[in-house]
Amino acid sequence: MTFEEAKAKLEEFGQLHVLKYYDELSEAEKADLIAQIADTDFAVVDNCKNLGKSQGRGEFAPLAAMQVSEIESRKEELFSIGAKALKEGKIAACLLAGGMGTRLGSDNPKGMYDIGLTKNVYIFQRIIENLLDTVKQADGTYLRLFIMTSEKNNDATVSFLKEHNFFGYPEDKVTFFKQEMAPASDYDGKVYMESKSRISTSPNGNAGWYASMLRAGLRDIILKEGIEWIDIFSVDNVLQRIADPCFVGATLGAGVSCGAKVVRKNAPDEKVGVMCLEDGKPSIVEYYELSQEMMDAKDANGDPAYNYGVILNYLFNEKDLYEISKKSLPLHVVEKKIPYIDENAQLIKPESPNGCKFEQLVLDMIHELPSCLPYEVVREYEFAPIKNKEGVDSVDTARELCKKCGIEL
């Protein structure tokens, strides 16, 4: 893109202020800014007018999960189906690792955080060790591991994993790609600048991973290697099992488009999204959308009907994902604190929300699918999220759960 083309694009979307300091920039900074303008979809900021407006939800109904008791009774059958698919190379894994460790007090990518007590035990290390357990169960068949980074943490993530020899995972089985970014704006749709040479951006939401894979040209690998299913999971959870044979077997055996790992809620009002049906199709109802009537509802066994919280571990059929990618998923407008430079080019870090970020969410991706199997896992063995430095879902709680599972820290 030339300077004139960049200027014309900005003019079209009313964003010419992006070039305010252009003449002061070095040649490298000018080139980077022009490239960023070329890559940025400024049309999304028009959605700032939708802030606070619900897009409306359909009619919710419970969606039964495959419970632990059934999984245990069918373990041999499910394991056999899953192990076969793994050994045939039909399953890939995708780690969503674009986040930083800011809330943990770290300036590094979140996966680099050390949770060890007597030795170094990094979040990335724990996740890869869990994936290596699946490799053993699949008689040594290594899965293709896609790792989604962000423009902010890509270089540090790649360097760190190479420096640690991918914690024993073969480097030729690992493929990195960057998540697409969306511009961040004020309430009038004017994009913020985080410096004289850079538009303020944020990741485009947890449903943006597949579109980002396609943009990076990675479907060529998927088709070439005969990958039919992709297990996506977040960097937060240091205990999760990844593409484990029983989960794979249950999903494939049920003939559904997606499997979703879920945990039994520890209280009716626990702050987790819950698998459900919405207008007859699979979906996720957020905890704040649960009515009292829904919280009180019971299933045939007398258990709460909306009882299974999602943990961001999903096994998707890739062909179905490709069909979804041809559609436009809803865009969610989120109010956030966005650092920016003021009219004097001074960096301001606001103490309260000052604008909008734009995201696509996995729940909308799932709602496009015809079917989904919620698959119950035992919370103490598979759910140790690290979201905070202290308190609930913190480094400390994750350490305690790891120790209970016999993991040496």
Image (cartoon, rainbow, N blue to C red):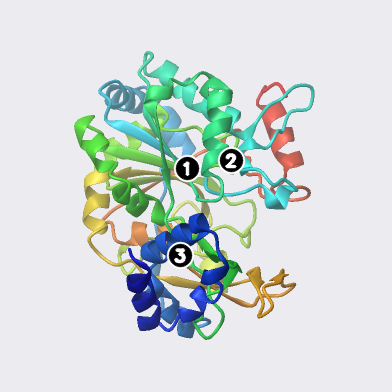
Dots 3 and 2: beta carbons under 8 Å?
no
Dots 1 and 3: beta carbons under 8 Å?
no
Q: Is residue 265 toward the left or the right of residue 83 in the image? A: right
The disc at residue 237 is 2
Q: Quadrant of the N terminus?
A: bottom left
Report how far apart the C-alphas of labels 1 and 3 lie in the structure.
21 Å
Q: What residue is drawn where x is 55% and y is 50%?
A: 152
Q: Which numbered disc flags the more N-terminal residue, 1 or 3?
A: 3
Q: Nearer the viewer, residue 261 or 190?
A: 190
Report how far apart the C-alphas of labels 1 and 2 lie in the structure.
8 Å
Where's residue 12, x and y in %? 35, 82
Identify whether 69 is placed above or below 23. above
Badge 2 element: loop
Q: Is residue 260 toward the left or the right of residue 348 in the image? A: left
Disc 1 marks a residue whose amino acid type is: Phe
Q: What residue is drawn where x is 51% and y is 43%?
A: 154
Q: Is residue 304 toward the left or the right of residue 369 in the image? A: right
Dots 1 and 2: beta carbons under 8 Å?
yes
Location of residue 170 by image quarter: top left
Closer to viewer: mark 3 or mark 2: 3
Closer to viewer: mark 1 or mark 3: 3
Label 3 sits on residue: 182
Residue 171 seen by the camera: yes
Q: Is residue 336 toward the left or the right of residue 283 in the image? A: right
Q: Nearer the viewer, residue 287 or 123?
A: 123
Report how far apart the C-alphas of labels 3 and 2 lie in the structure.
25 Å
Residue 58 seen by the camera: no
Disc 2 marks a residue whose amino acid type is: Asn
